[in-house]
Amino acid sequence: MKKSLLLAILLSFSLGLFAQDAVVISGIIKDKDSLEPLAGVSVRIKGTNSGTATNNDGRFELKTRQKIPFILLVTLIGFQAQEFEVKDLNQSIVLNLSSINIQANEVVVTASRVEENILKSPVAIEKLDIRAIKQSPAPSFYDALENVKGVQMTTSSLTFKVPNTRGFNIPNNFRFMQLVDGVDMQAATLGVPLGNAIGPTELDIASVEITPGAASALYGMNAINGMSNLLTKSPFVYKGLSVYSRTGLNHVGEGTGRDISNLTETAIRYAMAFNNKFAFKVNASYMQGTDWLSDTHTDQNPNNLKTANPAYAALDGANNIVFDGWNKYGDDALAGSNTVSLTGLTIDGKTNQTLTVARTGYWERDLISPKVDNLKFDASLFYRVNDHLEASYSYRIGKMDGVFQRGNKIQLDNVMVQNHKVELKGSNFLVRGYLSLEDTGDSFNVKPLADNMDLYSGGSGSVWGAKFKNALNTYSAEHGGALTSANLAAATQYARQQADASRVQPGTQAFEDLKNTIIKINNWDIKSATIPDAPETGGAALVQKSRLYNLEGQWDLSKQVRYFDLLIGADARIYDIIPDGNNFVDFSRPIDERNTPLDDGTFGNDVSYKKFGGFVQTTKTFFAEKLKLFGSLRLDYNPEFQPKLTPRIAAVYTHADKHNFRVTYQQGYRFPAIFEALSYVNNGRVKRVGSLPVINEGLGYLENSYTQASVVNFNAAVKAAGNTDAAALANRDLLKVANLPNAGPERINSFEVGYKSIVFNNKLVIDFDAYTNTYTGFLGQVQVYVPKDETVGTDPAVIAMIDRNRDPNPGTGGNAPSKGQDRYRVYTNAKNTYTNFGSALGLTYNFYKRYVVGGNVSFNKMKANETSDIFVTGFNTPEFSGNVSFGNRELFKNVGFSLIYKWQTPFLWESPLVTGKIDAIHTFDAQVSLAIPQAKANVKVGGTDLFNRKYLQYAGGPTLGGLYYVAVTFDGLLNK
């Protein structure tokens, strides 16, 4: 009975929705100059979700139940938007649109979550529309982001690019949010944004909106540095069949480390709408190529450092036995994780001398695959219940290969990410829910791969060290019976050859067999040097799986309130992480069992991480809409931390209808990302751990540890004094207790001013902004040393810090072997407050006919602190960067071109993996396009880094060079 009553109510409601007969509005839209029909013009009824687009003949037909009079909004990129009032249902609508060369009065939604004119946005915002993307000399729409004012792009791989704004850049950027149609693209456990890897295809992108600076007041965590919002094409507007094909060449010339290679990408899109009620679209694309190579041989541990052997000048340069290469793994001397201390040596007649030696390791080029591909597919269904209500379902899946840099380098292989999204959108509200599924496939961690290959074939640290020391003694016996400064370099070279005699060599079948075995073992522990099939041996497999559940909604109450505009919203997110025993574990299990699988093959119960939030935003105009005030307040709650309030206030003043001035103050909080909060990386000699206090229980790295810097200074002094217990106790004051705090959210206070205008009869666009950001509780990593079973400050704890616990013959010289130490790299908050500031200026000028010249320059700088912090924060941003562009979208009929020059000043890149200087960059990109209207085709020929000047974007990253391509697009086929 109840079910029948409910069914009757729903049926009555549905009939009520369609009780009024639909009417048909039709017409034709043409180019005002050529009088040729315009295809793809959006025709929408103002204040509703009802709309359609013109077909290839410029005609449209729109069914609606809207009562007259109503307003039609008519828009097409590259043409002046029009509003047309429909008063008579029988009238024939004929409209002519005027072409414009600069699109400045665009509508954006990202800055305030509601539609607004980009000139009057309360914060800096940039937009790339379809025409800007087509005219860009970049090979893809995502590459075109690199040309946007204030954007710094980090290229880890052909398939993996990450944008950032306003400093503190890292390849896996936790501070910059990437959305695709409102869906967060951050891969939960990998901790990397995959906007270009699983996002829209080249054919389905409608526009990209980028907001530099904090956006936490409206979007919550992970939007502290900025965000990008990738918006796709509606099948109600963009109909028909489209096909895209690009082929290109990279690794041209010398210096890339690889032979010239072919890159191809193919995409297809099909969309159709029926009676303005139901629509669908399907997209698929496949890209493959040979990846850029990271092969920089720079030594980041030269012999003058205390972590090397500064007392012996003979071991400098190429003879450095503690070499730690940028792109070499298994030789990690700076972290102290791949070194052996050889004590009791006699050198230059001095007895009881100590040498620190790094394992040989392997180059990145020998450990990773050069071939990468990216397969993307998505499908969406849309149903318009009425003119004001639209329901949709979207499915998106992406599979990718590539390389990215976190605390280590990760080889991504068959990574799979899926999204399911349902959405109900009204004219004044939105409800969205989505599920994201992540699976790392056959990926592996490059460092434990190198570590374990050295161990399996070269022996454990003690075994390898004994070989090295015995070889030194053999060399000295055969060359006068002593080690001296004159023969020390040759002796150590000989010793390494002998110690490495059994080590597998790149290019051999033994090397490939061992590598393929290790990357399939899900255990990064470095426990023995036995054969690979022994149960306690280490591997390198990256096995991570997660689910993300997100529900959000917003409601515009402006019509109900009347006196001001009011928008409210809320969201909830739950991460469900499946423990893998290497990156994430079940913390309810005993410490010594967390990395051990249960009988059912799992590593315990799933781990959850949650956050909930809500916001309210009010806006009010004054003085005939010349002044607009914005105010918003957001509350975010994560059960692991205290609730946080995030305010934003802003004002935009418009003078003479052209000059728009803005000022904004906002706060932002960033809860630790999944990897920062919950990681328990079982990475052999240095365990990487998240920031939540539960992880520290039983380990003691927060309250019972010494800082890495102090341990390095301590050991340098102890080795110089003979590496004895007495020398250690005499230098105990060099050890500094870390006293790490329980980590909390990162906070930003941001102040911004800006000006935006279009002047000189709509020919010159001026866009300026300046900001200052203050970070407190900045989240980063610090390495600490915990004495095994001892308490910091005691004599046994001091002795435990001596490097000789890794000597192949510990306890020599009458000194008992120490218990040693456990080493942790901990996510925690900085003690200092950090302030960075900067500004950006963009100009675009249509100076003659359709010739347009533009340019932008950005300045970003971090204020120096008087005292150093517990870790390196890594500003990682050039002080000045910018570009200059020149082009004409129609130099001749159907022929256009564009050219852009990009530059940035040198800067220091700092990270736990690699630190070093990045040289200045100067590159030229260009493209020529040919439109073939009869075939609905466009041909684009171009190249990036035209003169093939090799460069690095970040330390440890790949060497980039020229990429030359031809792309052909067929758009709007079968659009009747």
Image: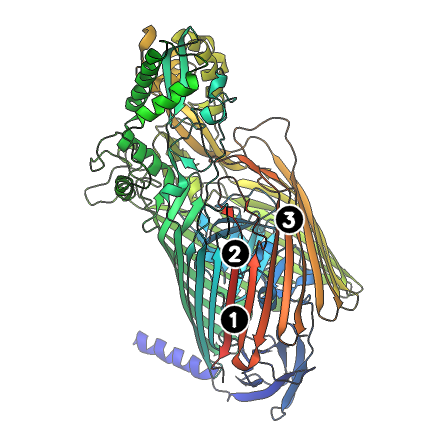
Which residue in the protein does label 2 denote? 963
Q: Position of residue 196 (x, y in %)?
A: 48, 57
Quarter of the figure that contains the N terminus: bottom left
| Amino acid at the residue labelled 1 | Gly
For label 3, the crowd category at 10 Å Cα-Cα, with few meaning under 14, some 14 to 19 and many 20 or more, is some
- Is residue 798 at all visible to an observer of this figure? no
C-alpha separation, residue under disc 1 versus residue under disc 2: 44 Å
- The correct choice, above or below, for 765 with respect to 593 in the image is below
Which residue in the protein does label 3 denote? 903
| Amino acid at the residue labelled 2 | Leu
Query: Tag 1, which secondary structure?
Result: strand
Which residue in the protein does label 1 denote? 426
Q: Nearer the viewer, mark 2 or mark 3?
A: 2
Say which label, 1 or 2, has the lower sequence index: 1
Circles 1 and 3: CB distance less than 8 Å? no
Horizontally, is 654 left or right of 898 in the view? right
Q: Looking at this rendering, what residue extends furthest in the front direction?
A: 479
Circles 1 and 2: CB distance less than 8 Å? no
Q: Position of residue 839 (x, y in %)?
A: 69, 47
- Is residue 223 at all visible to an observer of this figure? yes
Quadrant for residue 900, please give it: bottom right
Q: Position of residue 448 (x, y in %)?
A: 34, 36
Q: Nearer the viewer, mark 1 or mark 3?
A: 3
Q: Nearer the viewer, residue 382 or 309?
A: 309
C-alpha separation, residue under disc 2 versus residue under disc 3: 17 Å
In the drawing, what numbered circle is on residue 467?
none
Q: Nearer the viewer, residue 568 or 627?
A: 627
- The correct choice, above or below, for 587 with respect to 173 in the image is above
Q: Nearer the viewer, residue 699 or 821?
A: 821
Horizontally, is 696 left or right of 68 in the view? left
| Amino acid at the residue labelled 3 | Trp
